[in-house]
Amino acid sequence: MSFPTDANISLSWNSIEYLSEESFWPIVEVLSLGGGTIDLEHNPVVCDCSMAWLVYNPGFLESVLGSCPDGTPFSDLVPEDFQDCGTFD
């Protein structure tokens, strides 16, 4: 996968429910190096343990735009809310 670190990737309105580590880590890792973003607005993303890997990496979280079904922006999620999900490095 090759794209610039400052890319702005829009995946809004795609019915994405889960931000799996396997699928999204490689993208977010690249974007976090250069201020790029991935826009996931208007997707029914479930804010559960499946996205703890993202919350435990604040540099990654800054690169992901979107919100939980309850309206909480991803940027407002904190690791303490995912403490029962296990450890992520």
Image: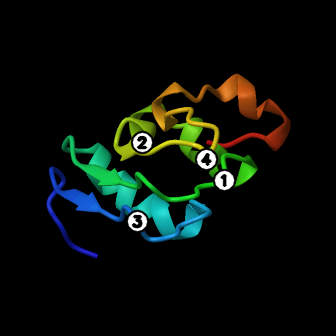
Instruction: Give whichever of 56, 47 is nearer the camera.
Output: 47
Amino acid under label 2? Phe
Residues packed near mark 2 inside 10 Å, few (<14), some (14 to 19) or many (20 plus): many
The answer to whether mark 3 and mark 2 are in CB contact below 8 A is no
Mark 4–mark 2 distance (CA, rounded to whole Å): 9 Å
Provide residue 34's location: percent of width, then percent of height. 19, 44
Q: Which amino acid does label 4 sit on?
A: Trp
Crowd class of label 4 (few under 14; some 14 to 19; many from 20; radius 10 Å) = many
Tell me the distance, in whole angstroms, between the alpha carbons under discs 1 and 4: 13 Å
Callout 3 crowding tier (Cα within 10 Å): few <14, some 14–19, many ≥20: few
For the C terminus, give its image quadrant. Answer: top right
Residue 53 image label = 4
Q: How far apart are marks 4 and 3 (CA)?
A: 23 Å
Which residue does the numbered mark 1 point to in the structure image?
46
* Circle nearer the viewer, 1 or 3: 3
- Quadrant of residue 32 within the rendered picture: top left
- Disc on res. 60: 2
Under circle 3, the secondary element is loop
Mark 2 or mark 1: which is in front? 1
Return the disc, 1 or 4, that comes first in the chain's sequence. Answer: 1
Query: Which is in the foreground here, disc 4 or disc 3?
Result: 3
What label sits on residue 13 in the rendered view?
Answer: 3
Q: Which picture quadrant has residue 10?
A: bottom left
**SS at circle 1:** loop
Mark 4 or mark 3: whose residue is earlier in sequence? 3
Q: Which of marks 2 and 1 is nearer the N terminus?
A: 1
